[in-house]
Amino acid sequence: MKGLVIANWKMNASLEAVRVFAEKWQHLPALTNVDTVICPPGPYLQAVKSAMAVELGAQDASAHVAGAYTGEVSAEMLRELGCQWAIVGHSERRAYHGESSRAVAEKAMAVMSAGLCPVVCVGETLVDRDQGRHEEVVAEQLKASIAGVSPEPLVVAYEPVWAIGTGVTATAEQADGMHGVIRACLNQVYGSESFGIRVIYGGSVKPENAGELFVCENIDGALVGGASLEAESFWKIAQAANAGSQ
Ligand code: PGA
């Protein structure tokens, strides 16, 4: 399966940072066996699109098509700006904006209706893992977050909450194990239609640990936060995915 590496810039960067990133990015060799996506903050979508040859994604999208939803941005608007991808259900949206898995599924459906590929995020907390409930929690969260969502096009991102922005990465074994659980769940829901769904890992992915993650059978790529803000660091992760999926 072709690798997929997605940069989630979160609420970081600036127009100047986009310019600096693009300047460095254009000198780095193109990678053919990995899809490389950047999800900048909404105001910088246009700048990223015009400055570099990457696919464009949004960090979130509204479940609604249009109307009185102050502050929200529809998937169709994102498509018009050139987005082909949209992250939905990131743990920061779930935690700080109270997004339920039901709401995440509605967003995923809206994203798909506009012709974009949703990247549905799931992941357990440290408490869930300490209690040994992590597999059950992630399976339940996933099923609720894809209820009614078609399998094509769809990406699932496994992001253990305790590994995001903490510098603590799940070991390759932990990540691969959970990806296996996610695959089994997708298979239960979609049958053979699940085979094309890429399952990517997120949580403190860096150039130093990317290689060991991407050799794992069930890991098809990464959703990268902090280490995606600098062009060379993000490229090295993409290069590891490129090598891992050959
Ligand atoms: P991180 O973030 O790589 O900084 O841990 C990943 C994410 O939240 O998508």
Image (cartoon, helix red, strand yellow):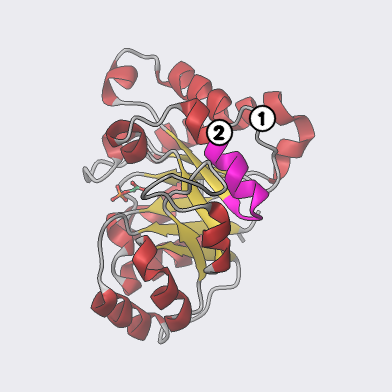
Q: Say which residue label 1 marks.
A: 148
Q: Earlier in the sequence, mark 1 or mark 2?
A: 2
- The magenta stretch spans which residues? 106-117
Say what amino acid the circle numbered 1 marks. Answer: Gly
Q: Say which residue label 2 marks.
A: 105
The furthest residue to the left: 166
- Count neighbours of disc 2 (C-alpha within 10 A) and say few if under 14, some if 14 to 19, many if 20 or more: many
Quadrant of residue 127 within the rendered picture: top left
The furthest residue to the right: 192
> Number of marks in the image?
2
Magenta span includes 108: yes
Say what amino acid the circle numbered 2 marks. Answer: Ala
Q: How far apart are marks 1 and 2 (CA)?
A: 7 Å
- Count neighbours of disc 1 (C-alpha within 10 A) and say few if under 14, some if 14 to 19, many if 20 or more: few
Task: Work out whether residue 185 or residue 153 is closer to the camera in this orientation and state it.
Answer: 153
Task: Work out whether residue 102 or residue 223 is closer to the camera in this orientation and state it.
Answer: 102
